[in-house]
Image: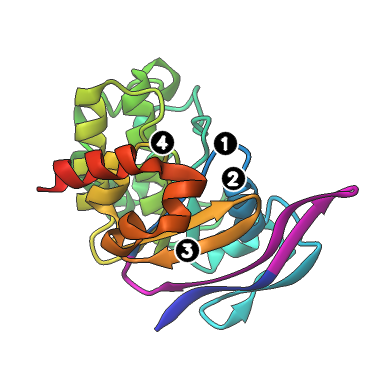
Amino acid sequence: MSILSLHNVSKSFGKTEIIRGVNLDIQAGERHAIIGPNGAGKSTLFHLISGKYQLSSGRITFRDQEIQNRPPYEIARLGLARSFQVTNIFPRLSVFENVRCGMLWQQGLGYSFRHLLGRQTELNARAIHLLEEINLADRADFPAGELAYAQQRALELGVAIASGADLIMLDEPVAGMSLSEAEAAVSLIRKITKGKTLVMVEHDMNIVFDIADRISVLVYGEIIASDSPQAVRANPKVQEAYLGEAALAAAGDNDA
């Protein structure tokens, strides 16, 4: 059952067409990676889905509701959350406060100043539990901006989960991390998105083939393949357009 569908989605900036008639179905509960060379339009596609950019043409449905060209906050409240290439947190708030802010709308509190959040015992307990899940409970009182880079990325994922979203979109979640940090991040992504739908843009092919149930390849604004990791690895068009036989073979060796 599709939770997110793109129907002939296009986006142009002036006379430059970036996304060219993309059709894509994301199944509920799957882990779906979108890959492609630099400039293929991957982040633009994320911006179109999450409401940062408006479509030039086409439709996007989330849970059978059309969401194209709606404000990002409306889309988020429907249950779709995303991260960005550049970490997007409240740096002056504590780690705990960042996570708690992510929970407010889900708990029916909105952003009302009528509620004394210190008295919201259940809300605060849930925030602490989530911090334990993302291994940041010992940093709860730290200003978020003082966390190490990998910890800030973990916090951003935690805020997305805190919103109660069923579909999580991650834009290059391990970019800029060391090998050990990336391995820890992948383990965290697996744990924290269990039972949810994950859509991910990532350049590290080892991580893509390790996590994804299905992979879509975007080249010059068009989807040239959308299939299982094994089928994508064997696809001659993908090998020619992006990955290369050596990269695919290396990913295959790491899967063995």
Q: Is residue 12 magenta?
A: yes
- Tell me the element at label 1: loop
Instruction: Estimate the spatial distance between the alpha carbons at disc 1 and disc 3, rounded to whole Å.
Output: 17 Å
Q: Nearer the viewer, residue 243 or 156?
A: 243
Q: Which of marks 4 and 1 is in front?
A: 1
Indicate which label's residue lies in the foreground, 4 or 3.
3
Q: Please identify the residue farthest to the right as the structure is shown.
A: 14
Residue 44 lies left or right of residue 212; in this view the side is: right
Label 4 CA crowd tier, 10 Å (few <14, some 14–19, many 20+): many
Q: In this view, does 24 lie above or below 188?
A: below
Q: In this view, does 63 lie to the left or right of 178?
A: right
**Which badge, 2 or 4, comes first in the chain's sequence?**
2
Circle 2 residues within 10 Å: few <14, some 14–19, many ≥20: some
- What is the magenta range? 9-30
Q: Earlier in the sequence, mark 3 or mark 2?
A: 2
Q: Main secondary structure of the magenta part?
A: strand
Name the N-terminal-most of marks 4 and 1.
Answer: 1
Name the amino acid, label 3. Ala
The residue to which callout 4 is attached is 97
Q: Quote the CA–CA distance across marks 4 and 1.
A: 35 Å
Q: Is residue 125 visible?
A: no
For mark 2, what is the residue? 43
The amino acid type, in three-letter code, at marker 2 is Ser
Residue bearing mark 1: 38
Say whether residue 61 is left or right of residue 238.
Answer: right
- Comparing marks 1 and 2, which lies closer to the viewer? 1
Please report whichever mark, 4 or 3, sits nearer to the chain's N-terminal start. Answer: 4
Residue named by callout 3: 225
